Image: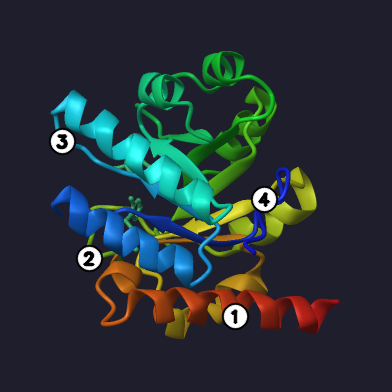
């Protein structure tokens, strides 16, 4: 059972890779869910709105089967149209306060904060459920992403008290120190969906969270 009860935000956050056929994408996300991913983000920059809506609906019903949460990247209107569990917005993706109002209190709202703690502070005031910092490592998926210092996670925990998500270049072999630094969610594309066995890779991430829990409980 994923750790997605109420608004408990902790664990692997699987972000969908681009350019896959819909059936392949669903199979890959299904494998990530089997491995224990509790959160999925549908990230698709393509322009075909009807196909994106169909894929979002299919992903949502798959996530529901596993008790996982589906967030939509960039597109509040799509999240509302398909009744997704939430939305993730970056600097150019719309106003966070307006998104919170449109979504209501129960839906999940996340914000990209890059390497910018002030942005995270403002996002919390706007009503987000988590803030994302990154890239925490150089990312082959988004090579232009700036690098973020890991001290942001410690500050987030002590000053903002909101869950923090790490993104960018994360691999299972270099994830543990991120958890120790204070990341609550690990958002991963390449290392998860390019793995030879996606379910096993997702399970390996979840194992890290369980070990971290034991160490600190
Ligand atoms: C969890 C998470 N964190 C950061 C991002 C990046 O958002 P953004 O800066 O808007 O870039 P795109 O992903 O839209 O290219 C994210 N998607 N998810
Ligand atoms: C969307 C995004 N934003 C910052 S890095 C990144 C890509 C993350 O992908 P990967 O896990 O393959 O580095
Ligand atoms: Mg965006």
Residue 53 in the image: above or below residue 151: above
> How many residues crowd around disc 4 within 10 Å: few (fewer than 14), some, or many (20 or more)?
many
Quadrant of the picture in which ligand 2 is shown: bottom left
**Do labels 2 and 1 touch, CB within 8 Å?**
no
Q: Is mark 2 within 8 Å of ligand 2?
A: yes
Mark-to-mark CA distance, 1 and 4:
17 Å
Mark 3 or 1, nearer chain start: 3
Lower sequence index among marks 3 and 2:
3
Residue 180, horizontal then vertical, whole percent: 66, 75
> Mark 1 highlights which residue?
208
For image coordinates 24% across by 41% down, the residue present is: 44
In percent of the image, x 38 and y 18: which residue is there? 77
Instruction: Characterize the local packing of mark 1: few (<14), some (14-19) or many (20 or more) Cα atoms within 10 angstroms.
Output: some
For marks 4 and 2, the one nearer the N-term is 2
Tell me the CA gap for discs 2 and 1.
23 Å
Residue 162 visible in rendering: yes
């Amino acid at each position: 059972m994923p750790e997605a009860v109420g608004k408990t935000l902790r664990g692997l956050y699987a972000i969908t890779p681009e350019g896959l056929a819909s059936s392949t994408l669903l199979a890959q996300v299904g494998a990530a869910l089997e491995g224990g991913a509790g959160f999925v983000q549908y990230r698709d920059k393509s322009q075909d709105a009807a196909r994106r809506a169909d894929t979002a609906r299919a992903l949502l019903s798959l996530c529901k089967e596993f008790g996982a949460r589906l967030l939509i990247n960039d597109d509040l209107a799509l999240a509302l149209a398909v009744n997704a569990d939430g939305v993730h917005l970056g600097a150019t993706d719309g106003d966070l306060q307006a998104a919170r109002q449109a979504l209501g209190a129960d839906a999940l709202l996340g914000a990209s904060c890059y390497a910018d703690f002030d942005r995270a502070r403002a996002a919390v005031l706007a009503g987000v459920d988590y803030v994302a910092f990154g890239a925490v490592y150089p990312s082959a998926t988004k090579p232009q992403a700036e690098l973020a210092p890991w001290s942001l996670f410690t500050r987030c925990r002590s000053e903002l008290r909101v869950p923090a998500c790490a993104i960018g270049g994360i691999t299972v072999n270099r994830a543990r120190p991120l958890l120790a630094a204070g990341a609550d969610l690990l958002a991963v594309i390449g290392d998860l969906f390019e793995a030879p066995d996606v379910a096993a890779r997702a399970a390996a991430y979840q194992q890290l969270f369980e070990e971290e829990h034991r160490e600190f409980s």
